[in-house]
Amino acid sequence: MEKTIIMRRFIHQEVVNALVNARLPYDHPMGEQLEDEAQIVAPAFVRIVDDRGGWIMLESRIKDLKVDPRFRDSVPSPAKVPRNDESSLRDNFEQIARGTAVVE
């Protein structure tokens, strides 16, 4: 089925939201791939057909594409803070809250 302008606009907005939620820039090159693969299902959900023919969410596809060789170098890797180091957790609290550091 050919996507109408309204459908493409809706898919674009959903892809931008998913990219931003994944802490990637709204204009990340991954967005084009997602928009090409995305389809509108049900009343207002955007999903992608996976390799097995099932529907997956944009967020799941973004996780897959983050390790794809085409996009791996363009995905920023956040600083890692050890879970059991309380002083590092305290010192990096703001970065953890902003999402620029992750707890492992």
Image (cartoon, rainbow, N blue to C red):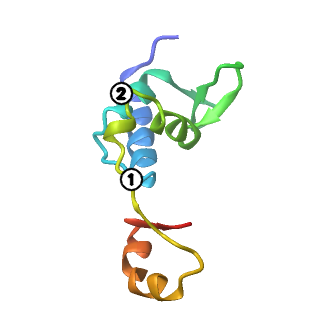
Q: Residue at x 54, y 43 (%)?
A: 59
Q: Residue at x 46, y 46 (%)?
A: 18
Helix, strand or loop under label 2: helix
Residue 69, quarter of the rendered image = top left
- The one nearer the camera, 81 or 8, is 81
Q: Amino acid at mark 2?
A: Glu
**Relative to 39, residue 94 above or below:** below
For disc 1, the neighbor class at 10 Å (few under 14, some 14 to 19, many from 20) is few
Mark sitting earlier along the chain (2/1): 2
**Relative to 68, residue 90 above or below:** below
Q: Position of residue 32 (x, y in %)?
A: 35, 27
Q: Position of residue 58 (x, y in %)?
A: 54, 38
Image quadrant holding the C terminus, namely: bottom right
Q: Residue at x 45, y 54 (%)?
A: 21
Residue 53, quarter of the rendered image = top right
In the picture of the structure, the residue carrying the numbered disc 1 is: 77
- In this rendering, position of residue 65 left or right of residue 71: right
- The one nearer the camera, 23 or 67, is 67
Residue furthest left as drawn: 27
Residue furthest top as drawn: 1
For disc 2, the neighbor class at 10 Å (few under 14, some 14 to 19, many from 20) is few
**Relative to 47, residue 104 above or below:** below
Q: Position of residue 1 (x, y in %)?
A: 53, 11
Residue 28, quarter of the rendered image = top left
Q: Amino acid at mark 1?
A: Ser
Helix, strand or loop under label 1: loop
In the picture of the structure, the residue carrying the numbered disc 2 is: 32
- The one nearer the camera, 88 or 24, is 88
Inter-mark Cα distance, 2 to 1: 21 Å
